[in-house]
Amino acid sequence: MFNQPEETFEDLNSSIASLDLNDLPKPAEAERKLSGIRRGVFVAYGMKSLNFFVDVNESLAEVQRTVEARTGIPMDNQVLEWENTGVLIDGNKSLRDYGMMSGGFCALSSKDA
């Protein structure tokens, strides 16, 4: 048979105690689990209207990136107001975070304007 030394309960316990969960790889903080539920976000900018379909769990920074690509306004200079409520959009939040599971309307302005 095999001539391996038997491990005692104490040996196993001490090897488990040496495990450090901080050594495990951490997922990226920006990583979100998408729901597959997409809703319309309408962004009014001057006389224009931009329309997007966004996963309700997706960061609204994705909307800001697309707005930047379509309008030329850098993300840092964008001011997005949610549904004329005075609430300014935080790009780190999602539609779900704002309770807007059915989508919504934003007014876009620029900090430079």
Image (cartoon, grey):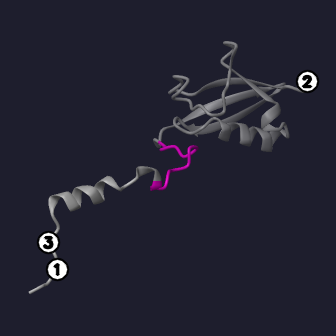
Q: Which mark is residue 98?
A: none
- The image shows residue 20, relative to residue 42, as above or below, that is below
Sequence-first tag of 2 and 3? 3
> Which secondary structure type mostly characterizes the magenta part of the structure?
loop
Sequence-first tag of 2 and 1? 1
Between residue 14 and residue 48, name the one nearer to us. Answer: 14
Three-letter amino acid code at the position of disc 1? Gln
Disc 3 marks which residue?
Answer: 6
Residue drawn 67% across and 25% down? 89
Disc 2 marks which residue?
Answer: 113
Residue interval drawn in magenta: 23-34
Q: Residue furthest top?
A: 85
Q: Residue furthest bottom?
A: 1
> Marks 1 and 3: in contact by CB < 8 Å?
yes
Residue drawn 51% across and 50% down? 27
Of circles 2 and 3, which is in front? 3
Would you call the spot at circle 3 few (<14 residues within 10 Å), some (14-19), or many (20 or more)? Answer: few
Disc 1 marks which residue?
Answer: 4
Left or right position of 15 against 64:
left
